[in-house]
Image: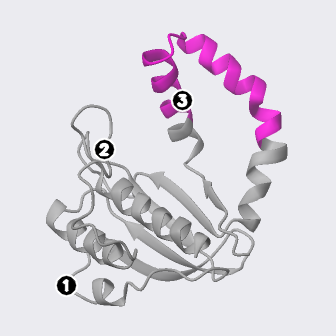
């Protein structure tokens, strides 16, 4: 049986901001209530959630690009650590074309020193460039249903995140692979 474990690991300040926004806007909590709950759950997160990182096949991290001063409203970029424990989609054709502003891959070391492929999907990349990547992954899903859905990468309202759309497609690829 093929396993496909994923772990989302945004920087702590981004994670807290997401939870505060969601819980105050959608669930009716106050900021103080959300912060108190996050603090109450911290020991469980440390004991049970974070240790899963070392056995995850894919680790997803949404964050601003360090050292880059993107304008407010620029979607967060995504970094996906792809471990060689599972087969990943073929992206050579997409990665070798042009200046690769939307996506690039590099060999890196994980926190524990193990080699990983670090796939970077940039929040500032133009839609046209990200669309090429999305169509490439979509074509490898083995579904005969035209283009990727318009709902990919949708945030609240009409905002769209290209890194989120590409990440969703990569995760869908792995979920479908796990069922085959």
Above or below, 118 relative to 115: above
Query: Would you place residue 34 above or below residue 135 in this image?
Result: above
Q: Which residue is drawn at 32% across and 52% down?
A: 152
Circle 2 SS class: loop
Front-lying residue, 4 or 146: 146
Q: How crowded is mark 2: few (under 14 residues within 10 Å), some or many (20 or more)?
A: some
- Calculate the distance from the C-alpha at mark 2 to the C-alpha at mark 1: 26 Å
Q: How many numbered badges does the structure rendering display?
A: 3
Task: Say if residue 102 shows up in the picture.
Answer: no
Residue 29: within the magenta? yes
Instruction: Work out which residue is located at the far front of the displayed protein and give it.
Output: 144
Q: Which residue of the protein is positioned furthest toward the left in this rendering?
A: 128
Q: Is residue 152 left or right of residue 108?
A: left
Disc with the residue nearer the chain's start (1 vs 3): 3
Q: Residue at x 49, y 33 (%)?
A: 18
- Please report the residue visible at 28 percent of the width from the left and 73 percent of the height from the top: 133
Q: Give the range drawn in magenta.
A: 16-45
Q: Quadrant of residue 149?
A: bottom left
Q: Where residue 150 appears, x then y in whole percent?
A: 23, 51
Q: Earlier in the sequence, mark 2 or mark 1?
A: 1
* Residue where numbered disc 1 is placed: 98
Residue 19 — which label? Answer: 3
The C terminus sits in image quarter = bottom right
């Amino acid at each position: 049986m093929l396993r496909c474990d994923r772990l989302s690991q945004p920087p702590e300040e981004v994670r807290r901001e997401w939870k505060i926004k969601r819980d105050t806007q959608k669930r009716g909590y106050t900021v103080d209530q959300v912060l108190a709950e996050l603090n109450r759950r911290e020991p469980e997160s440390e004991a049970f959630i974070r240790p899963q990182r070392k056995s995850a096949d894919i680790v997803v991290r949404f964050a601003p690009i360090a050292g880059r001063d993107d304008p407010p409203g620029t979607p967060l970029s995504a970094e996906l650590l792809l471990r060689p424990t599972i087969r990943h989609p073929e992206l050579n054709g997409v990665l070798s074309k042009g200046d690769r502003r939307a996506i690039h891959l590099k060999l890196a070391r994980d926190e524990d020193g193990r080699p990983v492929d670090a796939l970077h999907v940039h929040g500032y990349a133009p839609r046209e460039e990200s669309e090429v990547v999305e169509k490439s992954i979509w074509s490898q899903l083995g579904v005969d249903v035209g283009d990727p859905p318009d709902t990919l990468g949708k945030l609240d309202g009409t905002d769209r995140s290209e890194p989120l759309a590409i990440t969703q497609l990569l995760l869908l690829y792995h979920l479908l692979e796990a069922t085959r």
